[in-house]
Amino acid sequence: MPYLLDIIVLLAYFAVILGIGLSQRSKSGSVEGFTLGDRQIAWWAVLASILAAEISAATFLGAPESGYSRQNWSYAQFAIGTVLARIIVSFLFIPIFYKQGVISLYEFLGTRFGPLSRKFASITFMVTRVLAMGTRLYVSAIILVLAVAMWQGGTVTPNTKFWLYAGAVVFVTLLTALYTTIGGIRAVIWTDFIQVGVLVASLAFTIPYLLGKIPGGWSSVESIIKHPAFFDFAKPEAPGALAWLKNVFTQDYTIWAAIIGSTFVTMSTHGIDQDTVQRMLTAKNRRQSAFATILSGIIDLPIVSAFILIGVLLHAYYQANPNPLLPAESREVFPFFIMHEMPAGMRGLLTAGILATAMGSLSTALNALATSFSRDFILPRLPVDAPDSKRISVLRWSTVLFAVLIIIVGIWTAYFMAHNPKVEILPLVLGILGFTFGSLLGVFLIAVLTKTRGSDAGNVGAMVIGMIAVVFMSNVLGIQTKLGFETPFVLSFPWRITLGTFVTIGVAILFPTPPHQQQSKFLADSKLPV
């Protein structure tokens, strides 16, 4: 059996992940233990968990897809903004969250403004995260589709693709939900640590192996790299400031989107997104949390660049070694190489790497969704003297609920992607967050940067207006606007959160904070500007 060793590697991976996840049950017997690991997680484990959250299966295949189709590192520019944003988050948000002792971030908005802001923000997070998570899960099944194509000796029909995608979504979600439901955040973090190890091992083998198979080595690779190789200043063909301005806001991968757009994207994903911030709050103190957060941004650049390099190398390899069976969809090229060119054992390890990135991002999403839903809506309704076992039961059943919802979204996405193979992965995944996370970030910035601005009902209205502005400018509803240009102006996905943030702030700041909220414990203890 040529794939026996690969199957053994995969089974060993699943056994280790399940074993670690299930072993954490005894340490998840309280709400703080289940959601935050009693804030006793080592900084290096938090660092690995943050990286696991960021490097999803969409990155594992989406970044090589970008390198393969673009033959440059323009996507990696985004790392500039991610580092800047993590520094801001570490000094602006993390100290406040630790000081307030929040478990759900949106508790903070309840303290600062009132219950409407808290619940609307929590609902916004939950809906967005379910959609974003569900849309990326099908990626883990791409390699399964190619394996079936090899076995059949031909291409796979769209309907067969759909069933394979859907089956993988269900399997990966249920397996991840099993250890997440039982072991809580500790299971998430320690399985993430193993998954990052698998990821690094995959990269360490793939790059030199692939480079060694390219005739002429690196000199052949250099010849196919397109300029700009890294920085794209969005210089237009037509003269004039307006043409430049349009290029800046309508192109996805430019230096302006990297410095400004990416900063706001990362401020939202690492500052006000329960999914990522919950990992940060498991550290022993805010200094260790900040250190892990900033360091993850520094490490993120070489990791993402390595994934993009794989895509560039694949382009050079298949240019020198044409293969008539090469998939037409660029996102399938890396899995195709894994299945057809990788040696036994490594093929299994790389498949495990794809699954590891999918499960790593999914596990923390499930835990974060369950935490927000339980903490913001269900647990406050329980009697004050309700036992911990009852509270943990709520958290576990909430995890199961969101696993079901993510499966539903994942199956729908599987059908869409099976029948629309030309759609790129990264804009799809990142674009979903852009419609709502700008509004969330705007309300949090009003909360921490002012004492007297923003009200409970006003914040909800401001968030809704921010979302509508992003939807309108992104041409989601088919309503095109030219804004004085000859062709329609469609805002690119890296700028959506920036627009949503400023529109939300601009509206929310018009509403004064009621006097009784200005006397809250948070404001009394803080040193915020007026």
Image (cartoon, rainbow, N blue to C red):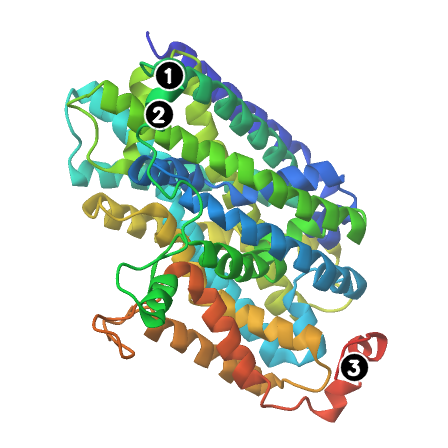
Residue found 41% across the figure and 42% down from its top = 58
Q: Residue 325, position in %: x, y?
A: 17, 24
* Discs 1, 2 touching: Cβ within 8 Å: yes
Please tell me whether mark 3 sits on a helix, a strand or a loop. Answer: loop
- Residue 461 vertical placement versus 12 (above, below): below
Q: Which mark is residue 430?
A: none
Task: Say which amino acid is labelled 2.
Answer: Val
Q: CA distance from mark 2 to mark 3?
A: 61 Å
Q: Specify the quadrant of the image occupied by residue 169.
A: top left
Quadrant holding the N terminus: top left
> In the image, 508: left or right of 109?
left
Please tell me whether mark 1 sits on a helix, a strand or a loop. Answer: loop
Q: Nearer the viewer, residue 205 or 388?
A: 205
Q: Residue 124, position in %: x, y?
A: 50, 68
Q: Which residue is mark 3?
A: 520
Q: Which mark is residue 217?
A: 1
Mark 2 vs 3, N-terminal side: 2
Q: CA distance from mark 1 to mark 2?
A: 7 Å
* Discs 3, 1 touching: Cβ within 8 Å: no
Quadrant holding the C terminus: bottom right
- Whether residue 336 is visible to the viewer of this picture, yes or no, is no
Q: Residue 296, position in %: x, y?
A: 63, 43
Residue found 77% across the figure and 48% down from its top = 39
Q: CA distance from mark 3 to mark 1?
A: 64 Å
> In the image, 419: left or right of 101?
left
- Residue 467 vertical placement versus 355 (above, below): below
Residue found 30% across the figure and 21% down from its top = 317
Residue found 31% across the figure and 23% down from its top = 337
Q: Which residue is mark 2?
A: 221
